[in-house]
Image (spheres, helix red, strand yellow):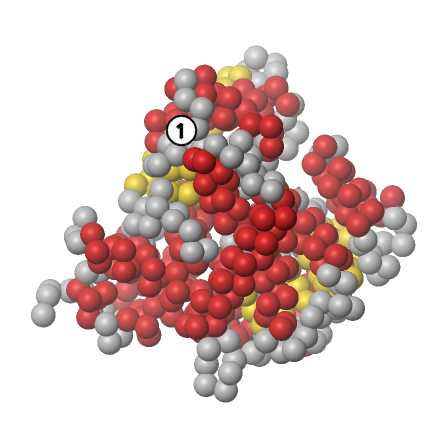
Amino acid sequence: MAVTDHVDLNGFMEGVKKRNPHQPEFVQAVQEVAEDIFDFIEDKEEYHSAQILRRIAEPDRVVSFRVCWEDDNGNVRVQRGWRVQNNNAIGPYKGGIRFHSSVNESVLKFLAFEQTFKNALTGLPMGGGKGGSNFNPKGKSVREIMRFCQSFMIELYRHIGPDVDVPAGDIGVGGREIGYMFGQYKRITNHWNGVLTGKGLEWGGSLIRTEATGYGAVYFLANMLATRDQDLEGKTAVISGSGNVATHAAEKIVQMGGKVLTLSDSGGFIHDPDGIDQEKIDWVKKHKTYRRGRIEEYVEAFPKATFHEGKTPWGVECDVALPCATQNELLGDDAKKLVDNGCIAVSEGANMPTDLEGVHIFKEAKLLYAPGKASNAGGVAVSGLEMSQNSERRSWKEEELQQMLKDIMAGIHKRCEEYGKQDGGYIDYVKGANIAGFKKVADAMLAFGVV
Ligand code: NDP
């Protein structure tokens, strides 16, 4: 037998903690996956001896760089930029870029690690990566944002390419920022290719990419409800966030007959007992995206709603919940409240919004609970389809893409069911997603030998 570190879960996690000091988000993400993978590989010597889990939990590389830019007053500002290339066993690295003051190496390593499993689950050939900067776009002028994006790309362009690593948007990075970065990439390299996704429709973007993450999370929710012969008609939904994912999740819930009660931002949440219908969602989209406003101003436009400063919406009674803002926004106590109030399903639009205690509470209560790596994979899936369209030099029709997104989400649900079904019929979607994602990447790594 090969010499291996056949340690137990605790021993493995001790090693991860020791090698990644001060990186709690990364350790948390690895722990959540390792809990399931240790059971799965117990009797599978090939994965042990090739140290596959240890290798996936060690990024292929982490590129860290300085980003200098000048603000509107002529002051020189210095930010940090990163690209974490976690694993490219099944395709080029792929994952978003996040601009937010909370970005650090731990957050990006956790996101790149999660992305590796998520991308594998889509069934498309994409490896896992993530990048970003601690640049805070809030309060910056459009020209400042443009100068920052250009400066960020001056370093990033060396590490990416349509067959190497294909970044996209994430928190703080939407179509506008992708445009500035793509423009700079093109200027530096003189190449027009599908190096970024989330592009504008006039210059290589894909229809439904903007909507795909939120819509996909709701399709996944509908797939889960169907296992209990239920659908969204008449169901009440509590949603956090008011950005891209949250507003499109809300839109699809409404289209499928549900009633959305809440939205939020980092200032607090709004509760609208009449329901947040399409007209109100359109108002929020404009208000948050173009006017760069705060969600609390919703109550001035729609006075029947209330604003709850500094609070999260998990105490509001509902049938289904969709955390769509950020990591660790739904903690153990919040999970308890949701369960006690009769919530039957949680579909994560954000990445790792529920902490480990919350995940355990949902599983114990046998809630229909989908982790982000399964339920929010619709965004990266359509990014994958954007890459295909760019390679083909064609644009596919909206109906084709809508159907593909639905099929991909149903496929992810099926893969989760295959590996997550427990005695008694309960589907552990966390386990299913972790094992299905792991197996695909692990088998590719085995084929390549020790590299
Ligand atoms: P946006 O920047 O469009 O929106 C983010 C929303 O979350 C805003 O409402 C923001 O409020 C809120 N938010 C951010 N940080 C916090 C915080 N610390 N506490 C409370 N609210 C917060 O981002 P997206 O909608 O694109 O992304 C949301 C989540 O979905 C992220 O976890 C992202 O990784 C994930 N995701 C996104 C995909 C995509 O296609 N965009 C794909 C897959 C996952 P405020 O305005 O106050 O900052």
Residue at (37%, 32%) from the top-left corner?
Answer: 161
Residue 51 located left or right of residue 93: left
In this view, the residue farthest toward the right is 303
Label count reads 1
Task: Using the rendered view, name the quadrant where residue 120 is placed.
Answer: bottom left
Asked if the residue at label 1 sits under 8 Å from ligand 1, the reply is no
Residue at (20%, 52%) from the top-left corner?
Answer: 448
- Can residue 229 be seen here? yes
In this view, the residue farthest toward the bottom is 424
Q: Nearer the viewer, residue 222 or 319?
A: 222
Q: Position of residue 258 (x, y in %)?
A: 76, 63
Q: Nearer the viewer, residue 228 or 286?
A: 228
Q: For mark 1, does the 10 Å Cα neighbourhood hold few (<14), some (14 to 19), or many (20 or more) residues?
A: many
Q: Is residue 184 above or below residue 345?
A: above
Q: Position of residue 403 (x, y in %)?
A: 59, 54
Q: Where, quadrant-wise, is the N terminus in this rendering?
A: bottom left
Q: Is residue 234 above or below residue 268?
A: below
Q: Position of residue 76 (x, y in %)?
A: 51, 17
Residue at (70%, 55%) from the top-left corner?
Answer: 252
Q: Is residue 333 above or below residue 381?
A: below
Q: Nearer the viewer, residue 187 or 123?
A: 123
Task: Using the rendered view, name the quadrant where residue 295 is placed.
Answer: top right
- Can residue 349 be seen here? no
Residue at (54%, 59%) from the top-left corner?
Answer: 407
Q: Is residue 187 above or below residue 50?
A: above
Q: Position of residue 419 (x, y in %)?
A: 41, 72
Give the residue pinned by disc 1: 156
Secondary structure of residue under mark 1: helix
Q: Amino acid at mark 1?
A: Leu
Residue 439 located left or right of residue 123: left
